[in-house]
Amino acid sequence: MSETTPVIKTERLIMRPTDMEDSSFIYALLNTPNWIKYIGDKNVNSIEDAVYYIKTRILPPFKRFGYSTYTVIRKSDKVKIGTCGLYNRKGIEGVDIGFAFLSQFEGKGYAYESVLKLKEIAFNDFKLKKISAITIKENIKSQRLLIKIGLDYNKTIKLPNDKTELLLYHSKEH
């Protein structure tokens, strides 16, 4: 991880780069019904799979770009509640902003708070020109959040080597 990778704080949350100590949490999150329904099964079927997922999918972008997946922690009790991140995905123009939360922490404004802050950091600190986001048509909550943080629906796309139709959202150019 880069020395410049920030720990991000909001009123209620701490967002820090996801690392190996998050393997149990990542295992739990990636196996929630909503993750599987809305994001897809990543075949993380054990803690060992979660360690491999972190090593191969989360840590390399931090080294290369300075950003990737952040573990979202509630300040009040230090509980890990979700993830929020910036991703360079093939087939998407601009850096993709994504988020996922354990079901018991949905609907409390944590996703909005973390995504809005990460979007601000993406433009101000990482100097990104454009933020994109993708979601499946059925994920109405994510679509509402993307609009709430200022992204606009652009078009329907399919990522390379994937048959799932996704809704693509973009920010205005910075």
Image (cartoon, rainbow, N blue to C red):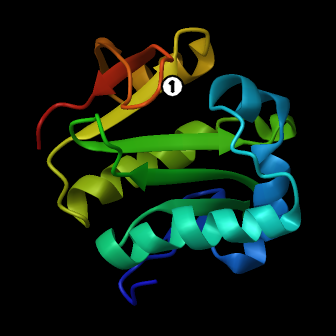
- Horizontal side, residue 81 vs residue 63: left or right: right
Residue 42 falls in which quadrant of the image?
top right
Label 1, secondary structure: give it: helix
- Does 99 appear above or below 36? below
Residue identified by numbered label 1? 145
In this view, 170 is above or below 28: above
Residue 27 visible to the viewer? yes
Residue positioned 73% across, 23% down in the render: 37
Image-based side of 83 in relation to 174, left or right: right
Residue at image position (46%, 62%) is 68
Tell me if residue 107 can be seen: no
Which three-letter amino acid code belongs to the residue tagged 1?
Answer: Leu
Q: In the rendering, at what x and y percent does residue 128 appear?
A: 19, 54
Q: Quadrant of residue 172?
A: top left
Count of marks, rendered view: 1
Up the image or down, 110 lies above or below 166; here it is below
Q: Position of residue 23 (x, y in %)?
A: 78, 68
Residue 120 placement (x, y as % from top left): 32, 52
Q: Quadrant of residue 133?
A: top left
Q: Residue furthest bottom?
A: 3
Residue plotted at (28% across, 11% down): 155
In the rendered image, the residue lying farthest to the front is 161
Pick whichever, 30 or 143, lies toward us.
30
Q: Position of residue 121 (x, y in %)?
A: 33, 59
Q: Residue at x 41, y 67 (%)?
A: 61
Q: Residues within 10 Å of mark 1 (few under 14, many from 20)?
A: some
